[in-house]
Image (tube, rainbow, N blue to C red):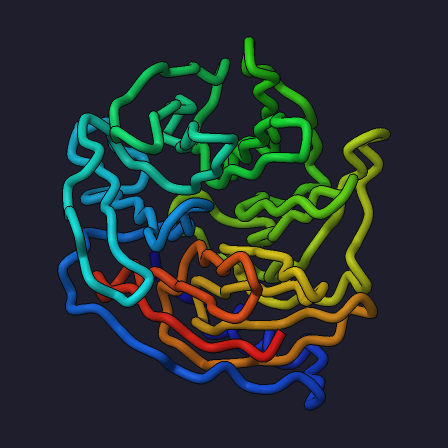
Amino acid sequence: MTLKPLATTLALMCATLAGAASAAQPLWQTDAVFRTPESVLPDTQGERLFVSNIDGAPNDKDGNGFISLMGKDGHVQQLEWVTGLNAPKGMALVGRRLFVADVDVLVEVDADSGKIVARHPAQDAVFLNDVAADAQGHVYVTDMLLNRIYRFDGKALSVWLDSADLTNPNGLAVSGDTLYVACWGVMNPADFSTEVPGHVKTVSLTTKALSDYGSAAPIGNLDGIEMTPGGRLLLTDWMAGGLLSVAPDGAVSKLDALAPGSADLGVSADGKTAYIPMMKDGTVRAFSLDD
């Protein structure tokens, strides 16, 4: 992926920087042992983190992809824990089932054994990216290139929302009856560049009503998105790099600059730690948050 200077300049000019939010404090960084790490997800049981590794091009069906296990202290427990994937990206847990977006398939994994138990094809999918689950166990998956969100209801995976207004949706997070969408911005599929970077949108889980979160002002080429227990919305900007916090009025605070390639973050259950995969560096970084 290459970055056009115009996109960076516009994102910095249009994003409103609020000084109220405190900066994130670095805790640790792993060695460069991962292979294109795209997403980190804390396990709801124990002290483990799941890390998805694309290990190749983000849309290649090459069989190289895998999921790693690591401790919340940054120690890698098993590099190739789940294998037999192509280009795994976002993940979500429903009970002890780990759901993984893998190009055009939602892969279901036993979160205890690491065994793949099912593969759910997404009709016409091109670039499945992030995954989130609601309180009822429904699983939502973005297709970044098709401006589409799929939903798995436990039996079937089908198109749930199809709208150009999603502006190349990347990350997903659920809080209450709202789905939060980190939008990349309308992009050139050849190199993922944008003239106008994306911002955060919300979707009602009951009505599917689509709205801007606070403001339609560009923020960045957004990747990961998480809502902390304290109500802080956290984002990562893949192209420019950065861990961001966005207020309900749309005001943006940069908590850490990071480097380009900062991807789909995970947040601890207490909201006090953020785990960020650095796709270009092959590392995972952890930060302390004041939620």
Above-or-below relation of 66 to 291: above
- Nearer-the-camera pick, 246 or 188: 246
Instruction: Residue 216: give x, y in percent of width and height.
Output: 77, 61
Residue 128 located left or right of residue 15: left
Residue 269 in percent (x, y) is at 54, 57
Outermost residue on the bottom side: it is: 19
Q: Is residue 66 above or below residue 245?
A: above
In percent of width and height, residue 235 lies at: 56, 63
> Which corner quadrant holds the C terminus?
bottom right
Determine the residue positioned at 48% across, 81% down: 256
Residue at 54% x, 86% y is 23
Q: 223 or 176, which lies in front?
A: 176
Tell me the residue at 51%/74% (across/down). 8
Q: Quadrant of residue 218?
A: bottom right
Residue lying at the far top of the rendered structure:
155
Q: Nearer the viewer, residue 247 or 218?
A: 247
Q: Is residue 213 above or below residue 100?
A: below
Q: State the count of labels.
A: 0
Q: Which residue shows up at 45% across the image and 71% down it?
A: 240
Give coordinates of residue 278: x percent, y percent: 32, 64
Instruction: Locate residue 63 relative to residue 266 in the image: left or right.
Output: left
Q: Quick one: 262 or 162, which is closer to the camera?
A: 262
Q: Considering only vertical position in the picture, is 106 above or below 181?
A: above
Quadrant containing the N terminus in the rendered view: bottom left
Residue at the outermost front position: 46
Question: In the figure, residue 2 lies in which quadrant?
Answer: bottom left
- Image quarter of residue 63: top left
